[in-house]
């Protein structure tokens, strides 16, 4: 019989949206329309919610965690009769992997891009030229002092 | 009605697909919609990867963008489904949760800003439908795209979560069909019309399979192009077709066109002025047909 890790659940509950997992009664409404479940035999949002309820940190926060297969389509959010918003619980779990440094590199790359440029897409000279050809103005500057101040988790 | 809005184009459209920005900026004045630009926006930030790192930072940067619009005192209008997702959800969460709003505002104090929730976030298609009226789109058309069959693809974040986005019924949406019909083209429904494009799934194989299935479902219908509204879906289906050709040896050759490019064509703009030649999948047949319509 599975032993519930309440300590893990407490940490999950402290994440924004993480507490919603507590309302899951395992009906499976989230599974039928889930594209990730359709395309991956190992992805099942109901099972991910169960693992969250049981507090199974290991599979959920591991580097090869199935949570990264979520397509972020929000069908489960639409379907859930309990307003669990499984996609948001999965997002809260992803936030936990960021703290545990087990998240995929792409996430770090995106954070770094915003930290350095305020944007997630780097403007190439080709696109800059195209903007000019189309009569568009140059892209404006992002006030990076503001962005950096807001991105610091500890601020003095 | 005073149709003035602050545009939020986001990173994908501004820095990768400027032809979409140009199409919006050229077609809206002909509908009587005025865009009032505001300086200093950052990335929305991205609702998939950036949000995966830390929701509070994600909400704070999004709230900063909302603050800039609040200071200018007009509603924000978004053109990218991802930006819409981030900005709409942030507004929804912060206006509905005073504690969360206080947490975000504590961070915003560092730069002397406060989120108040005084302006709305609107996707451009809802502005056209609800503030303007779709009949006005039809009235702006000088070259109806008669005989052009357009497969519609909605993408996820325009519609869901529906109570946050408030755009259309997420299971039986009609807004894009109505907009395509308004420019004289024939909207074509396909079997996988509400399937996710797969771009936000961080797996090697799954997104390719999903893209393949959507394009295969469109291929059967003998359409002139796929019309959509999301730059991320565009990426997945346009550039994605080259990837699928390498991976599966299958060439679909279905042109993918952003709705406002189609509207521009119907308003008489030339295909090259709308950057169609920059798309990976070229549209010679569609352009030929357009010539026939014009002639």
Image (spheres, coloured by chain):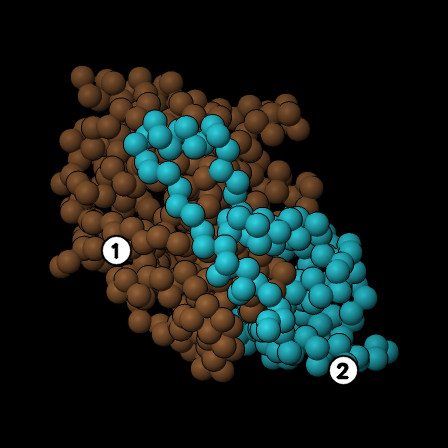
Say whether residue A118 is left or right of residue B4: right
Which residue is at 23% across, 32% downward?
Answer: B266
Residue B69, x across and y down, in percent: 33, 61
Q: Nearer the viewer, residue B233 or B285?
A: B233
From this view, report whether residue B80 is shown above or below residue B167.
above
**Label 2: which secondary element:** helix
Residue B186, x across and y down, in percent: 29, 35
**Residue B245, quarter of picture:** top right
Same subunit, labels 2 and 1: the answer reads no
Which residue is at 64% across, 25% downward?
Answer: B246
**Residue B4, quarter of picture:** bottom left
Q: Split into 4 quadrants, where in the image is the C terminus of chain A?
A: bottom right
Q: Nearer the viewer, residue B273 or B217?
A: B273
- Cα separation, mark 2 vs mark 1, equals 48 Å
Q: Split into 4 quadrants, where in the image is the N terminus of chain A?
A: bottom right
**Label 1: which secondary element:** strand
Chain B colour in the picture: brown
Residue B74, x across and y down, in percent: 26, 62
Chain A colour in the picture: cyan
The tag on residue B5 is 1
Residue A129, x across and y down, in percent: 41, 28
From this view, report whether residue B57 is shown above or below residue A66.
below
From this view, report whether residue B211 is shown above or below residue B61.
above
**Badge 2 local density, few (<14 within 10 Å), some, or many (20+)?**
few
Q: Chain of mark 1?
A: B
Number of labels in the image equals: 2
Q: Chain of mark 2?
A: A
Res. B161 in view: no
Which residue is at 31% across, 65% downward?
Answer: B71
Per the image, the residue denoted by label 2 is A6
């Amino acid at each position: 019989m599975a032993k519930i890790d309440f300590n893990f659940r407490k940490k999950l509950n402290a994440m924004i949206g993480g507490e919603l997992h507590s309302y899951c009664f395992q009906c499976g409404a989230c599974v039928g329309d889930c594209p990730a479940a359709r395309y991956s035999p190992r992805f099942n949002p109901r099972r991910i919610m169960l693992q969250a309820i049981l507090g199974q940190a290991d599979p959920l926060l591991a580097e090869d965690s199935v949570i990264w297969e979520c397509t972020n389509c929000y069908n489960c959010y639409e379907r859930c009769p309990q307003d669990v918003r499984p996609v948001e619980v999965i997002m809260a779990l992803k936030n936990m992997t960021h703290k545990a440094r087990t998240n995929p590199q792409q996430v770090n790359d995106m954070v770094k891009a915003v930290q350095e440029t305020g944007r997630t897409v780097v403007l190439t000279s080709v696109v800059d030229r195209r903007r000019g050809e189309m009569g568009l103005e140059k892209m404006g500057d992002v006030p990076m002092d503001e962005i950096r101040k807001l991105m610091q988790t500890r601020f003095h | 009605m005073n149709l003035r809005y602050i545009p939020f184009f986001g990173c994908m459209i501004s820095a990768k697909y400027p032809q979409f920005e140009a199409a919006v900026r050229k077609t809206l004045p002909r509908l009587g919609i005025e865009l009032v630009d505001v300086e200093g926006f950052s990335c929305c930030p991205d609702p998939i990867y950036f949000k995966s790192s830390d929701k509070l930072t994600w909400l704070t940067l999004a709230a900063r963008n909302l603050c800039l619009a609040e200071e200018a005192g007009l509603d924000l209008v978004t053109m990218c489904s991802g930006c819409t997702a981030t900005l709409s959800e942030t507004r929804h969460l912060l206006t509905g949760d005073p504690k969360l709003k206080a947490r975000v505002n504590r961070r915003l104090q560092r730069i002397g800003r406060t989120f108040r929730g005084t302006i709305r976030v609107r996707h451009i298609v809802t502005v056209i439908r609800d503030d303007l009226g779709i009949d006005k789109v039809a009235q702006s058309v000088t070259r109806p795209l008669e005989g052009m069959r357009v497969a519609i693809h909605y993408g996820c974040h325009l519609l869901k979560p529906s109570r946050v986005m408030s755009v259309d019924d997420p299971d039986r949406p009609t807004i894009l069909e109505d907009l395509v019909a308004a420019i004289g083209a024939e909207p074509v429904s396909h079997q996988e019309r509400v399937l996710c494009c797969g771009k936000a799934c961080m797996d090697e194989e799954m997104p390719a399979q999903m893209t393949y299935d959507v394009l295969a479902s469109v291929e059967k219908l003998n359409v002139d192009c796929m019309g959509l509204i999301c730059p991320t879906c565009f990426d997945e289906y346009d550039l994605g077709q080259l990837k699928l050709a390498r991976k599966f040896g299958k060439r679909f050759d279905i042109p993918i066109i952003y709705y406002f490019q189609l509207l521009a064509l119907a308003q008489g703009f030339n295909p090259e002025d709308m950057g169609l030649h920059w798309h990976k999948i070229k549209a010679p047949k569609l352009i030929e047909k357009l010539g026939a319509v014009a002639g």
